[in-house]
Amino acid sequence: MLNCCHRLRPGRRAIQVLISFLLMSLFAERLVAQRPLPHSVARPSEVSVSHLHLDLRVDFEKRTLSGSAKLKLQRSDGAYQLWLDTQGLAISKVTDVDGQKLPWELSRPDIQLGQGLSIQLKAATNEVVIYYSTRPGAAALQWLTPEQTTEKRHPFLFTQSQAILARTWVPCQDTPAVRMTYSANIKVPSELLAVMSAANPQKRNDSGEYSFQMNQPIPSYLLALAVGDLVFEPLGQRSGVYAEPSVLKKAAWELADTERMIDAAEKLYGPYRWDRYDVIFLPSSFPFGGMENPRLTFATPTILAGDRSLVALIAHELAHSWSGNLVTNATWNDFWLNEGFTVYFEQRIMEAVYGRKYSEMLAKLSLDGLKAEIQELDARDTWLKLDLAGRNPDDGMTSIAYDKGYFFLRMLEETVGRKQWDAFLKNYFDQNAFKSMTTESFLDYVDMHLQPDADLRAWVYGPGLPDNVPVVKTQELTRAGKAALKFKDGTPADQIASAFETAAWTTHHWNHFLRTLGQGLSLDQMQELDSQFKFTASGNAEITKDWLMLVIDSGYEAGYGRLREFLTEQGRRKFLQPLYVRLAETDGGLKRARDIYRNARPGYHSVSAQTIDEILGVEASQGL
Ligand code: BES
Ligand code: ZN
């Protein structure tokens, strides 16, 4: 073939080339369509799940959910097999809607991905019912004893499905490329209330039976359930807060600006499409700051600082109602499409509600954190477009997706101007609503509708931070940084306090101050800082974390009691991880860390425990 080509006359040759080009592109298209998804066995182009109905009983004694999942299917011609993701589910049978058994099989388990469940469909099968129960160790679920709750009277259960843990409690196509509506009947002990990422009850009922409906199609990672001694308080017309009784008042006070945030968000990028926006405060072992479960953000109580200084987290989870929940990353390699857009949108909400001076402080902390983390990461992991095939998608949860993503979008804003950029983004959310988006389809969309004069590919397919990274201007934090350097140069702490008017500082000033102090403080300096600013006694988790880093670096013994306490009383991975890493690096610190961890681990969610197991070299199964 190759040999004869050059002998063809030019006209015929052109036709030949054209034909082979067409054939090749057709073939390439098929390859793309059939390429396996990076973290799922689902084959949605053959059969996809369009609706899920859960019927589950929550058993706190056995620590199981048991019942059934009914899946409505969309089948393409000639497709007779449904592939679902599962991990550790005990499946008893699979039937069609008439109760006729369907043959099924589980594939060999993969530590990361679990087991594929393949179900043989009959010609007319468009619904399957899977009868199953979860196992006590299911990674998405945290079963808390009464002692592990704030109230200490009732047990508590919550789920965390992102990134690929939905499969540990629901057999599903566990990929963000597939969306489904869902409904659920959940039976719980009658003293407890159940809530989901769906239309929710606001009051407990005596039957313990709750029904849920989510009429907008969502990806599996947004499936969520919490069960506990929960009460509700409205914040405004369409928002409210759930918490254990003794947390409720504090929580409602802290979130007083929620309606203003929703209004600001809508003004920026179009209507809120999920009807209500509620927040639930979980017990302190919740492994994240927040999780954007639709209609019901799951939040850590560690943002209840008593001064509303940590509510950017609410702006962030609210922003996901557009970036992520409406327009969704198609794979976890495109995670920046969820998180980078959300940090960008979060900052815009914060700017609208609290002013540019405030939001620029957040941007500065984000930039400093990003630069530090780029130093630590492998170059390939600093591209916006990640390559997480064969790895835990959690590895993508670095400041690259969040903060490099943010600065990339801010660079685009500054290149084309805010007016054009905002119009573009509003359309982007509108036109791609309820769809999944890859990095490539986003870049195509930019090519079509924005055409900025900037090198996008250097950000997306290249390492580190390109030269055109936006400049952050914050006199506020510049001054806080100066204060830190002055102290290091010998100015006494009380003079720092008066000269820099630290009494008026926000959490963000303190974060920047403590981070600028950095390593190398003497014990005397630590002592002086502590007696002037009372860091060890701080009730603000963000400040506590930064202070404890210095405690470890300097070996400041008076802070170690607080360190042990902090690592035990809350399970937020973002706080645990750096502290354990730093502790394990110091002389004799690894032993100390393992000692603290031995007591604390039973209180952690599996997501945090897995990370800390790796840091401290602990085999999950062997314990400590
Ligand atoms: N969706 C994330 C949490 C997440 C990401 C869970 C990946 C599992 C896998 C959530 O929106 C988030 O980003 N939370 C941040 C808070 C935010 C203010 C940066 C967190 O938990 O720290
Ligand atoms: Zn997020």
Image: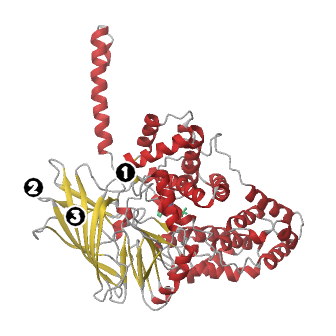
Q: Which amino acid does label 3 sit on?
A: Leu
Do the CB atoms of the residues marked 1 and 3 lie less than 8 Å apart? no
Q: Check the image and name the residue furthest to the top.
A: 9
At x 51%, y 58%, the residue is 264
Q: Residue at 32% of width from left, 86% of height from top?
A: 205
User: Dot 3 corresponds to which residue?
Assistant: 71
Residue drawn at x 61%, y 46% is 464
As drawn, the label of residue 433 is: 1
Q: Considering the image in quadrants, where does the C terminus appear?
A: bottom right
Q: Are marks 3 and 2 in contact (CB under 8 Å)?
A: no
Is mark 2 in CB contact (under 8 Å) with mark 1? no
Which numbered dot is residue 123? 2
Q: Between label 3 and label 2, give the one nearer the viewer.
A: 3
Count of marks overlaid on the render: 3
Q: Residues within 10 Å of mark 1 (few under 14, many from 20)?
A: some
On the image, the x and y values in percent for residue 54 come to 26, 71
Say which label, 3 or 2, has the lower sequence index.
Answer: 3
Looking at the image, residue 476 lies above or below residue 152: above
